[in-house]
Image (spheres, helix red, strand yellow):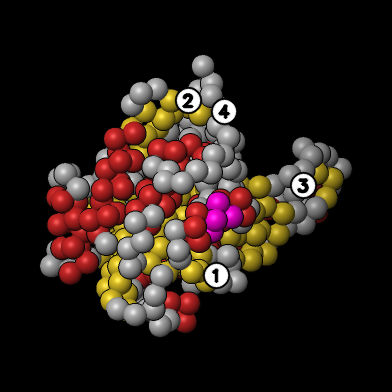
Amino acid sequence: MEQKFRQVYIQGMDAIEHFRNLLAIPSLSWKEDGISAYIIGKMEEYGYHFRDDEAGNLLFYRTAEGRKVMLSSHMDTVERASEPHVLENESTFYTDGHTALGADDKAAIAAMLTAAENKPDALFLFTRAEELGLQGSAKLRKEFFLPFDIAAAYIFDASGPVGSCITSAPGKDTIEITMLGRTSHAGFAPEKGINAIKAAARAIDLTAVGRIDDETTCNIGSFMAQGSANVVPDKAVYVAEVRSLSNGKREAKSREIKANAEKAASEYGAECRAVIRNLYQPYTIDEDNPALRRAVDAIAAAGRKPVLKATAGGSDTNNIRRLGIDAITLSAGYENAHSVNEKIEKEEIKALVRLAEALI
C-alpha cells in the first residue's frame, strides 16, 4: 500500500525519521528551497551557524578554529524522484515502481543531520544541482571555505552498500553541435535546400562512440530536428559527451567530434557551430592518501568492510578537489539510483550514520 509522509518536527529525530521527512519535500535541481529550509531549521536547532554562496550551497559550522573534517551531500534529486511514491516495510524503503525514490542523496542528508545533532566540531556541506552535471558545486570558490582548515572532505554520493571508497573518477565534456542547412520545399525544389539532418547524421557516423579505450567513453545523447516531411530541414542539433580519466584523451576526443561535424558540414555545404564545455576534471587517489586511510579506518569502525573502487561517473568530489581540498566519494547505501527500482535498506541508513560519526 502506498504511504504518503508528512513532515514531523520533533526533538532528537533519528536518521529514519529525517529520511521520511526529506522524501516528502520535492527538490528538483535549482528548486531545492524546501530541503534547504528543512536543513537550515534543523542545523540551527542543533547550534550551527551557516553561510551560503550565490548558488545556494550551504556550509554549516560551529567554530572556525581547529582542523576539521567536512561531510557533504547534494540536496537535489532527478525529476523522476520529485514526488516519489514511497513504500516501506520493516527493513526497506522502495517505491511502487512508477517513480524513483530519492535516496540519492536524501539518505546522506538524513545521516548527516543525525550525526550533526551531537554537535561535533565538523563542517557540513549541502550542494545544489548536482544531478545537472555538478552545476552547484561548480560554483564553489576557495573563499567560501575560509578560514576553515579542512583535513579531508567526504562526499556521500555513490551507489552500493556503505563501505565503498571511490579512488578514481573521470572528467567530462559535453559537445553541442548545431548543423545549419538551407530550407526549401522537399517536393518542388529539393535541390535548392541543404539538408541539416543528413549533414548531422554524417558527422555522427564519422564519430566512434561507446568505450573508446580503458580510460575513455563517448556517447551521442540527444538529437533534435523538428520539422515537416515536406520541407528540407535547415537545422539539426545533437549533444555528445566524453568521459576520461585522462585530460588529454578527453580533450582530443572532444576536438575529434567537433572536427567530424565540420567535415560533414563541408561535404554538404552546411554550416557547423560547435560548443565544447568541460563540466569537471578527473582525479585518482593513491592508496596511501591520508584522507583515504582515514575513510578506511572509519568504515571498519562502523562495522563494514572497506572496498576501494573506480567509478565512471562524476560527483561533487570532482569540483571540491579542484579547490585543493582532499575529498573522497563514499557509498551512501542506496541501490538502482534514478530508476523506478531505487531502494535503500534501513540498516544502510543506520550504517551511514555510524560512518559519519566515525569520520568526525
Q: Which residue is denoted by mark 4 in the rendering?
A: 4
Residue at the outermost front position: 11
Residue 5 vs 332, above or below: the answer is above
The tag earlier along the polypeptide, 1 or 3, is: 1
Q: Which residue is denoted by mark 2 in the rendering?
A: 87
Few, some or many residues within 10 Å of mark 3 (<14, 14–19, 20+): many
**Looking at this view, is 193 or 146 the one in front?**
146
Instruction: Find residue 359 and report its image quarter.
Output: bottom left
The tag earlier along the polypeptide, 3 or 2, is: 2
At label 4, the amino acid type is Lys
- SS of the residue under disc 1: strand
Residue 26 vs 202, above or below: the answer is above
Q: Specify whether residue 260 is in view.
A: no
Label disc, if present, on residue 196 of the rendered structure: none
The residue at the point 77 percent across, 43 percent down is 227
Q: Is residue 262 found left or right of 182 in the rendered image?
A: left
How far apart are the two marked residues, 4 and 3, measured between alpha carbons? 51 Å
Q: Is residue 323 found left or right of 186 in the rendered image?
A: left
At label 1, the amino acid type is Asp
Q: Is residue 51 found left or right of 108 in the rendered image?
A: right
Residue at the outermost right position: 188
x and y percentages locating residue 91 in the rendered image? 33, 26
How far apart are the two marked residues, 4 and 2, measured between alpha carbons? 8 Å
Q: Which residue is denoted by mark 3 in the rendering?
A: 232
x and y percentages locating residue 159 in the rendered image? 34, 44
Residue 47 vs 68, above or below: the answer is above
Residue at the outermost top position: 1
The range drawn in magenta is 37-41
At label 3, the amino acid type is Val
Q: Which residue is denoted by mark 1 in the rendering?
A: 52
